[in-house]
Each structure stands twice: as structure tokens, then as C-alpha cells.
Image (spheres, helix red, strand yellow):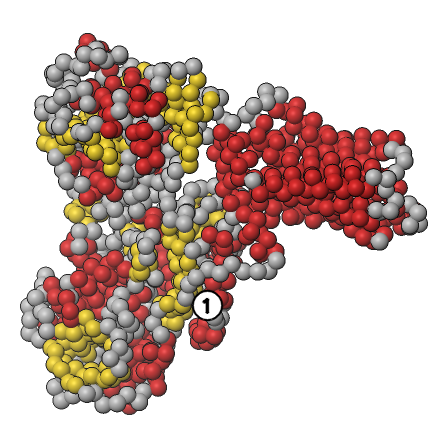
Amino acid sequence: MSYLLLLSVFVIATCGLVYELVAGTLASYLLGDSVTQFSTVIGVYLFSMGIGSYLSKYVRGNLVAVFIQVELIIGLVGGFSAALLFASFHYVAGFRALLYSMVALIGTLVGLEIPLLMRILKDRFEFKDLVSKVFTFDYIGALVASLLFPLLLIPRLGLIRTSLLFGIFNVLVALWALHLFRNQLGWPKLLRGAGTLVLILLGLGFAYSGRIQEWSETAAFSERIVFSKSSDYQRIVLTSESDELRLYLNGHLQFSSRDEYRYHEALVHVGLRAVPQPRRVLVLGGGDGLAVREILKYPEVESVTLVDLDPEVTHLFQTQPLLTKLNGGSLSSPKVSVVNADAFIWAKQAAPGYDFVVVDFPDPTNFSLGKLYTTAFYRELERLLAPEGLAVVQSTSPLVARKSFWCVNRSLNSVGFKTLPYHVYVPSFGEWGFILAGKLEPKIAAGRALPADLKFLRESMLQALTEFPPDMAPVETEINQLNNQALVRYYEEEWARYPGGG
Amino acid sequence: MKALWTRRRFLRGFGGGIAAAGLLAACGRLGGSRREIPGRICGADAARAHRLRAGGFPSPSRVERASCVIVGGGIAGLSAAWRLSKAGFEDFVLLELDEASGGNSRGGENAISAYPWGAHYVPLVNPESEAVLRMFQELGVISGFDAAGRPRYHELYLCAEPEERLFLQGAWQSGIVPREGLSLEERDEMARFHEKMAAFGAAKGGDGRWAFAIPVDLSSRDPKILTLDRQSMAQWLDGEGLRSRPLRWYVDYCCRDDFGTPADQVSAWAGIHYFAGRRGQAANAEPNTVLTWPEGNGWLARRLREACGDRVRCDAVVYKVAAESSGRRVEYWDARGDETRALRADQVIYAAPRFTAAYTVDEYQRSRPDALAAFHYAPWLVANLSLPRPPRGKGAPLAWDNVLYESPGLGYVVATHQGLKSVPGPTVLTYYRPLDQEAPVAARRSALARSYAEWQDMTLNDLDRAHPELRAEAERLDVWLWGHGMIRPEPGFLWGPARAAAGRGLSGLHFAHSDMSGMSLFEEAHERGIAAADAVLKSLGKKVPA
């Protein structure tokens, strides 16, 4: 029995170090600067263990009962520490205060463990043996934890599940001690009940750790979430705050209802009014139907084909009342046909003859999306376009990502497009850029009158949109091809540099 | 449109992504239990080829006639057939032992993607590889040339970025030359090595030819350069004082990658050829780019075959190539119909691995030529893993070619890399591993004894370091064993007597296989196939196309 108690030293030592490592890792990830985070967490933790050891002398009475209570509290607090810290990161202003309080609390309790155990065991061993044995198991436990943590636990379980798992171990030690000393305890049933409850809580936490994860993630949005769903392709989150609707895809803001009209009016009308006979229109991306809403303001448009990857998005914008109000039910118009397909693959097999094409893809944040901005794609775009047609390409911010913007322009030119770059200010995004491209030189001075009900664009403004002040003026760039993906590199570099952005 | 990353992105990566592999997988491993991943050993039945050695085929039941018979449907045989077809000459039959043509450029396909079973890329073509340049123009791989004479390649066939990455010290770095965590001396050595290779690349011999050319036989015969063939690549590195561990790993990796043979068993001439033999340029790509397709060079094999119509017969095990008073008689066992058949031909192109001629060609039955015994081949394991989503990992994003530092395998290529999807989805990884821990004969013997489960373990154990999630996520894992995957350019082989002797044909019999070049390169196979076809056309008095 005494040796089995020593084994519990080993288990609790492992648990203790795991909590410390969890806190250090989590702090490094959330706050950055791993050297600072790790040394302050370790410092606070060790100091708190000292406090725990000091306090242990005030523990009187039934030491085993106190030990079991301490184990249960460590199991509960330590077990949920990672989940709690993750979840609170977005809510709690004083995150650091919470972090260090938790580290101090766990440290203090862990500091109590060994002195208490030594006192429990003091009559079973000679003092020199006791000290030697307890500390041997303690340090072996520390070694095991420090090896398991990076090699097995983090890669396979992640932080949240690791801390929950070790919380369970702490509770098991408590329940086992309870079993061993059941005859010496005053309220064994009460303790057993408490232990079982904590065990169930931790077990549930483990089983639903995915939910905890998701919940702590959605906490990143400061606004009220009215809809959220993971489709096959992305996480769709719709938020609402005092009449403002926002759509996020994978955490990237797609629009705010407060100023999206600026973006979509600029995207559509600058080019569409300049096309002589716009009968067939194609929209690539733009599953929100907001560009289509603008396109339908031209009665001569006979058909609009919208190609968007994600059926969840197009379905949402066809059915959700807040959203159909915003896009005017554009996606349900008899002129509109919605195709759910990957744009590049669809474009390769599509028949040509489009008078106006809106290319409204997500920014080139990775190599997969980057393919939609390459010369290989623009060759398909060129093939799809009618001889007198125009295409417009959303091309990120020429102010923040100047090289990226002009790289898109150069890539369009390199496959034979004549281009006309322009930009507008959209408060939610900042200064935003578009490029008009045609087989013939795009001219915006000519063209029909703008639709009457626009909230932003005026004919008198058009010329000014094409002026690029020195801080956005053209720069030399590479041509973006599949085999160099120059744009993704520019984009990453430029947005990473942007303060508070990216 | 705007990005919003850091915390959230990492949050997902940390708790969700990695942990998704989950407790089940972890417990499964700790508990020693194994999750069943469906799969099997694919490829030609080794027994089929081994029947050649056993012999004892009954006399052919049927005899047909063809002006030309091509034995072997790898790249050399298919290239010969393609050339004959393009010349308007259709009176030929190609006999392939396997159930499909392609040789070690075979590819496969499942619901997710086409994928390679062997050779999977061709570097930008050297200006002297004229036959390959011509063929690439005909297939639309090359659409034209710029003012500097550099080919313009089809953008979808150029390997897309990111091309390569290396798993080193727990994270992926871009590029496969080790970079992260190297000491100053190690960096210096790496630079010194690359300088030397660049110098070899630009070098010409006393005879005015490139020191290292493709095809290999266009290389300079300057004895000062050929002397490199007498030592191993490892000995050459020792002699140059290039000993640092990352460099030695890198060179060894390259030798194993191209020759299936470690640096201490590869001729230094061959090893240097890997780095210095490629001078291909492109109007629209960096010089070190490669051409690739989802099914690897299976794409090229298919395109070459398309021109040949129904003149390709698979499951045809040629066991005898006899000399007759005029022409040749080729006997084969139709493994599907289980009957033996014969073809009378004026000319034969023998495009199967050169060593097999020792078992089939009449003249060799009387006296076995020593030259063929010098042809040694590297055995390979290739595995294809189907995954519901791309593999994850820290550092540089998933590339086409993904290599693990100091690993017994060569890493994996991603079949969907050349695809056009804007959101990554299910994919197939093709894992490569030369079986070079033992000498080839012993390695083949061990390989035959290994079970499917052992191959699966070998594959997953190697990748585990970078991708512990594969065990839990792989939906299927098929393996293919190449007993004689590629020729081994051991010291003395390239410029020794055996290869020279093997190059000479016999009456009415033309040999064409890349092993006669000492390197299993697409260009070598193609050029030899074309040359053999032209020789046949000439012998038959037909017009040879320009």
C-alpha cells in the first residue's frame, strides 16, 4: 500500500508539470513572446508551489481528507484550465490577470500535495527513505511529463484535451486514495460523490472539447452572431449589431451592410455601364448576390450566371430574410442561374460569349486561392469574354498591398487584356482596388447613364477613381503564374506589414 | 476579403486541427491496437516475369506476321511505337508484359485524383534532347519558343508553386536544400558544393562537348571527366573535403531519388550529372522548374500510346526472340488467354529492360554475354495514400514534393497539386522509397517475403514524424513494388565496357531502353525509342521523318 501511495506521487507530479506546461504553451501562443511567457509562468508556478508548501503546516485534522479535496480541486481547476483560458481570451479584458491567478491557484494546490503526502506517509518509512523515495518519484514524474507533453500530448490531443485528461488522472488519484483510506474518513460518501461529479464534468468536457473549441472561436467576433455554420468549404458567420449585418467567411470580413453598397456599386457599375450591349453577365464568386443586385438594375441584361463554390452560402442568401432584404432577392430572380462549382474548373469547360464578367474572389491569402489570379485563369477569362465585353477583377487594396494590386494588373496585361485600374474608399475595408479588363481598351468616359437609385457613384466621380496618387502609383512586379505564385508572396508580405491588419 | 488571422487561425490549428486526429488514434496506438486501412499490393505479378527464367512454355498455337514487333511498353517502347505511327507506318505490334503499358511511368486513378505509380516528372528539356523537344511540341507541352530560343511551356504542366519543401527539426521549410539551423561551416560547404556543380554544368570537354549531357551519350569523352566514373559519389565528396552532415544527406537524397541508389554506391559521374546535366530553360519559368501531371509521367505514356491505336497488346510475356533465315520470330505467352503465340517480323525493337534479353534472345542462349550481368537494378516501393483532406504540419505550406530530412524514404508528392481547386480537399499522396538498405538481390528477396501490412507500416512509420494524423485519416493505402525499378549507375558502369557492348544490336534486332544509358531518365528512354524506330524505318526502306 505504501508503494502504491508512492505511485500516486508519480502521477500527481506528472499532472502538476503538465498544467505548468499547458499554461506556458497557451500563454506563448495567445500572447506571443514565448521566452517571457514561459519564464513568467514557471516563476509564478514555482513560487505558488512554495506558498502551498508553506501553507501546508496550517493543515490539521484528517490529512487524507484534505489531500483528497486538494486533488479534486486540482483536477477540476487544472483540468479545465486550458479550455477556460482559451474561451476567456476574447472576453476578459484582464486576460493576463486571469492567467496568472489560475497558475497561482494550481501552483499553490500542487505545492500542498507533496508535504501532505509526506506527512501521511511519515509513519510508514524512515525519514531518510521517505524523503528519498518521494522526491525520486516526484522528479521521475516531472521527466515523464516533460517528454510526453511535446512528443505525444500536444500533437495528438491538443492543449484542451491534454489538461482535461490530466485533470481526470488527478481525480482518479483522489478516488483511489478515498478507496484505500475509506475506513479512516469521516464523510467518505460525500467525498466520493464530489469526486464522481468532478470526474463526470471532466469526462463531458473531454467528450465535447470540440464544442468548447468552437465556442471559444466564435467568441472572436465582437458582434452578436445570428447565424453560423461550417460548410464543406468554410466557416460561415453572420453577425448583427444595431442594424449592421456582417458576413465573415473563415474569419475574413466579406461585407458590412453599412457600406457594402460602395464596394458593389464600384465593382459593377464602372464597367457595366461602359459595355455596349450587356446581355449575358457572369459573376464568379460573390455568392452573397450583392453584385447581382446591382447588375439587375440594367434592364437590357437578359441572363446572369453566378458561379460560387459553396452551396451553403448561396442557399443562405436565397433564403435568410435579413439577407434577401439586403440583396433584394437577387438570387431568386428568373434571370439569374446559380451554379455551385469551383470557378477555375467551371471556367475551363464553360462556353464563351459573356458581355460582362465580375470576378469577385476572396483575396489571394493562400496558394489555392492564388490560382484564381494567375495567367492560366486569366486566359480562361479572356476566352469567356465576348469581343466587346469587359471583365472587372476585385484586386485587394492598392494602398496596403500596392505590389499585389499592380501584380494583378500586370498579369491581366500579360495575357493580352487592356486594363483600366480604379479604386474607391470602403470604410470597412479601407482603400479598395478594382481592375477593368477588356480585349479592347476599356473606356469609362463614354457609356450610358448610371442607374438612378445609387447611393454612392456619380458619373462626375468616375474619372477621379482612375487617378492613383503617389502612394498607390504603379510599381514593377512579376507576372503571377501557377508556377511562381508571385502574388501570394506579395500579398502575405504586404498585409503582414500593415499595422493591426492582416 | 480582408484577412484576420493570427490568434484565430492558430486556435483552430491547435485545439481543433491537430486534436482531430483525436484520442481514439492516440489510445489506439498506446494500446497497441491498429486501425485497419484498406489497400493491397498492386502491380504486375512478379511470378509472371519470373516464368521467363523457368521457361517450359508450350509451342505457339498461332503464328501471325508484322513488319516490326516492339517488345516492352515502357517509355522507350511507346516512343518507338509513337514514332512509327507518326511516320504513317502501322504494320507493327507492341507486346507488353504487364496488364497496361507505361513501364515505370505507369499511373493510376481513383475517385479523388489520378496519381503516379512511378516516374512523376520531367525537368525542363535540355537543348540537345532534340527528340523530346519535338515530341513536346507535337503534344502541346511546348507551344513555341521566345526570341532567345527558350521553349514556352503549357502553364498547367509546369509544376505549380510551391514546388518543394523539407521537414527539418520538427517543421517544414521551403525548398529541399537544408537551410534551417545550419552552422556557418555547413552553410559554407553547401555553397561550395553548389558552386562546384555550377562549374560542372558549364564545363565542356576537350572534344568541345558538354561534360554532362542528356542524352548521356552526347556527353564529352574527355578522359579527365570520364575518370569521375571510377569512383563513387561519396568518395568524390570525401576527396573534395565535403563532409558536413546536411550536405551529405542532401547529395545522398538526390542519388537515391534519381538512381534508387545511395551516394556511396553511385558513380561520381552519375551523381554529378544529377546536378550538372540539366541546362533546360523556359520562356515562362525559372530554369530549375519541372513538368508534372497528376498521374506523373503516366500522362506522357498515355499520350504516346494514343497514337498507336490497337497495335498495343498487354499481358503479353515475351519468352523467346529467335533468329530466322529472314527476320525474327517472337514468341509470347498471352497471360490473360493463357496461350502461347508467335509473331514473325522483319525487325524487332527490344525495349524491355536490357537484362531480360539474356533469357529471351536466341543468340544469348548459346553464350550468355557478361555485359548483361553488369546491369544492376534498384528495387523500389511506391505507395499511394488517399486522404480526406490535405496533410497538415508546421511551417511552409504543402508543396508538390515533400521530403523528410534523414528519412529512409524520399517523401511524397501530392497528386492534386496541379489541380485547379480553390479550396484544398481530398488528395492522394504518392510515397517513394528505394529499397536500398540491402544490396539489390537481397533487397528483392526480402521484399517478396514482406506482407501488405508490413509495407503499410514501413510507409506510415516513415511519414509519422511529420504526419502522425495519417494513421487515423488515410482512407486507402496501396503499394506497388518495382523489383527492377531503375538501372543503378554504379562506378564503372556508365563509361565501362558492359554498357558499350550492350548498346550494339543484333541482326534485325534493335535494343532500346533507358538502362542502356545507365540512368532511368525519361529523355534517355524517349531518345532511344525514337532512334530504334528510325533504324527500323531505314532498314525497311521507309522514309524517316525529319
Chain under disc 1: B
How many numbered marks have been drawn onto this rendered protein structure? 1
Give B217 or A459, whichever is nearer the viewer.
Answer: A459
Return the x and y of residue B328 as percentages of the image width and height. 17, 83
* Residue of label 1: B452
Farthest residue, direction top? A460
Q: Residue B484 at what x, y percent from top left?
A: 37, 71
The quadrant of the image that shows the C terminus of chain A is top left
Residue drawn 69% across the image and 36% down it: A76
The residue drawn where x is 18% and y is 19% is: A297
Picture layout, residue B113 above or below residue B161: below
Q: Amino acid at mark 1?
A: Tyr
Q: Residue B503's spot in the image, x, y percent?
A: 26, 74
Query: Which picture quadrant has residue A12?
Result: top right
Please tell me which residue is depicted at 56% across the width and 23% down the height of the picture.
Answer: A91
Q: Residue at x 73, y 30 (%)?
A: A105
Instruction: Please state which of residues B380 and B510 is positioned toward the viewer in this rendering.
Output: B380
How many residues crowd mark 1 within 10 Å: few (<14), some (14–19), many (20+)? some
Relative side of B314 to A491, left or right: left
Q: Nearer the viewer, residue B171 or B112?
A: B112
- Residue B242 visible from this viewpoint: no
